[in-house]
Amino acid sequence: MSEMTNNHKLDRLMRCIEAYGADPARWPEAERDGLRALLAASPEAQRALEATRGLDALLDRAALPMPSPELMADVLAAAAPSRVRQWFALLWPFGPVWQPVSAFAVVAVFGFFLGAVTPLPGPSDADLLAGEMDGFAGGPAQTLEVL
Amino acid sequence: MSSHPPEDARSDAALIRRVTAGDSLACRQLVDAHLRRVVGLAYRMLGDMAAAEDVAQESFLRLWRQAPRWETKARIATWLYRVAHNQCIDLLRRSKTVSEEDAPEAADTGTSPGADPAADHQGRQVAAAVNGALARLPERQRTAITLVHHNEVTNIAAAEIMGISVDALESLLARGRRRMRELLEDRKGDLMGEGK
């Protein structure tokens, strides 16, 4: 059983060398330490590792191309935020500005809605009574003239 | 192996917050760390430097637009490579720009000339031979090797970028490397001596 497990682990190490090459830094992180320990104990795996070093070195020679200076300049120019965005960032440095703006908009819409559906306050009972009394006595102006 | 920029998702999020606030130094830092690798991935996939630069530019434009809504768990490199990869796949579907038999046009790899012109010449020949062999790989094998070997992406991130399982990624890598050895077998004497 133990031998089977060891063979299984050695198979896995050989597959990793075949896929990721000789540099353990490219091996799967979760398995790296175990595979390294196994490598130290396996001459067969060490031979496989040595055999793949040449291809790794050749791949290193095929360096990635350099981007043109124009591309670099264009990408950086596109990153510059507008004055409006900078102004918002100063006002709200805690994250995306749409959050406070949305909250303000929701409150404004709700307030507008509430204002639209709420009936205007009519004259109170006291006002009505005062009006009736004014009519009965000829109104405040007439009262003043009498005085 | 040169190390990938030592960033975790939190430092990526902090960098993106600085970008959103208009910090030009943060923009420069981000572009310096990732532009060449994004261009390189697109170039390897498309075999055309102008198209690769267009893909890279569009990827960064999308990043700038995404910045205010950046998710703190996301990684900048993985996000950029996935966006670039998807654009390349779309372009390849629309028109087959790379023939598997043709090497891509030579691109400037930024290596400065050394003191020994003969060695420089031989070095360029080796690079051209290896790039030619890479160009003859099927696109998915070439992409897998570029992501894992040249862009130093982890296996999990590379699989995520390509939209495949880790097992499938390992299979692509192993077949790609095997094919590279076959393609370079004819020039093994020169290349292995030079490459080591």
Image: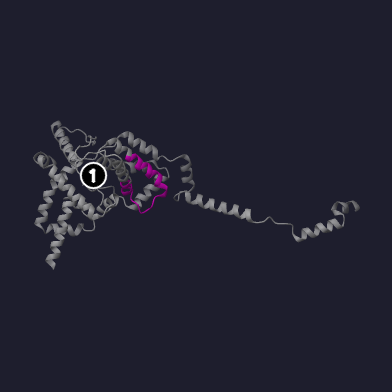
Q: Residue furthest top?
A: B117
Q: Residue at x 48, y 51 (%)?
A: A99
- For residue B196, which quarter of the picture? top left
Q: What are the residue bounds of the magenta stretch? A: B55-82
Q: Which residue is mark 1?
A: B139
What's the coloring here? one colour
Q: Residue furthest bottom?
A: A1
Q: Secondary structure at mark 1?
A: helix
Q: Is residue B63 magenta?
A: yes
Q: Residue furthest right?
A: A146
* Pick the front one: A141 or A114: A114
Asked if residue B173 shows in the view, the reply is yes
Q: Position of residue A73 (x, y in %)?
A: 35, 35
Q: Position of residue A3 (x, y in %)?
A: 11, 65
Chain letter for mark 1: B
Magenta stretch: dominant SS? Answer: helix
Q: Position of residue B9 (x, y in %)?
A: 34, 52
Q: Is residue B23 placed above or below B169 in the rendered structure?
A: above
Q: Residue at x 35, y 51 (%)?
A: B11
Q: Is residue A34 placed above or below B11 in the rendered structure?
A: below
Q: Amino acid at mark 1?
A: Glu
* Pick the front one: A135 or A45: A135
Q: Position of residue B148 (x, y in %)?
A: 23, 48
Image quarter (top left, top right, bottom left or bottom right) of the N terminus of chain A: bottom left
- Disc 1: CA contacts within 10 A as few (<14), some (14-19) or many (>=20): some
Q: Is residue B168 magenta?
A: no
Asked if residue B33 shows in the view, the reply is no
Q: Residue at x 16, y 61 (%)?
A: A9
Q: Is residue B77 left or right of residue A5?
A: right
